[in-house]
Image (tube, rainbow, N blue to C red):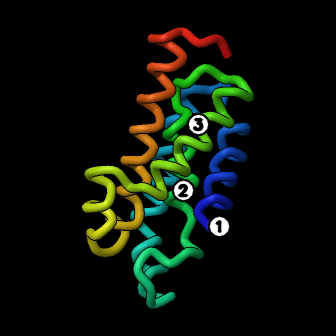
Amino acid sequence: MPGTVGSLGGLLGWFLVKNNEVLYGFAILFLFVLGIMFSGEAERIYGKKDAGIIVIDEACGMLLALYFVPVSIFSVILGFFIFRIFDVLKPPPARRLEKLSGAMGIMMDDIVAAIYTNLILQIIFRVICIKT
């Protein structure tokens, strides 16, 4: 459940930056850098590998999943569900990256899930040309 809540937080961020691609890009970079800076320390404090309370990785991933995707309710809902599926299933190399120690292990599996999600959404909306 915490991953879903973190992803919803990412959607809130998406709502704030969706109309400004430069600000959007900086928001992704900002969350990623914050995640690298602080999630490893949070993991040590909580004493658990990728503790559920750490959700900056999902928020960052959700933003990346929707980057340059046509803006619509359909694309956001579809992107949310695809991202959550990839985040849970952790297709290669996400599961291997999750095993990295500290912040890189916390952040990178969600980045991979986000990249896969974004690629699928780009194919759906730009190659297959499903209308949003």
Q: Which residue is mark 3?
A: 79
Q: Earlier in the sequence, mark 1 or mark 3?
A: 1
Image quadrant containing the C terminus: top right
Q: Is residue 83 above or below residue 127?
A: below
- In 3D space, how far apart are the residues under numbered discs 1 and 3 (Cα atoms)? 17 Å
For label 3, the crowd category at 10 Å Cα-Cα, with few meaning under 14, some 14 to 19 and many 20 or more, is many
Three-letter code for the amino acid on which mark 2 is drawn: Glu
Q: How many marks?
A: 3
Decide which of tag 1 and tag 2 comes sooner along the chain: 1
Residue 13 appears at what percent x and percent y? 67, 45
Q: Kindly identify which residue carries mark 1.
A: 1
Amino acid tagged 1: Met
Q: Is residue 37 left or right of residue 94?
A: right
Query: Is residue 129 depicted above or below 70 in this figure?
Result: above
Residue at image location 68% in from the left, 45% down from the top: 11
- Rate crowding at label 1 as few (under 14), some (14 to 19) or many (20 or more) other CA atoms within 10 Å: few
Please tell me whether mark 1 or mark 2 is closer to you in this view.
Answer: 1
Which percent across, then down, holds residue 10?
A: 63, 49
Nearer to me, 71 or 132: 132
Q: Is residue 63 above or below residue 45?
A: above
> In front: 35, or 77?
77
Mark 3 residue type = Gly
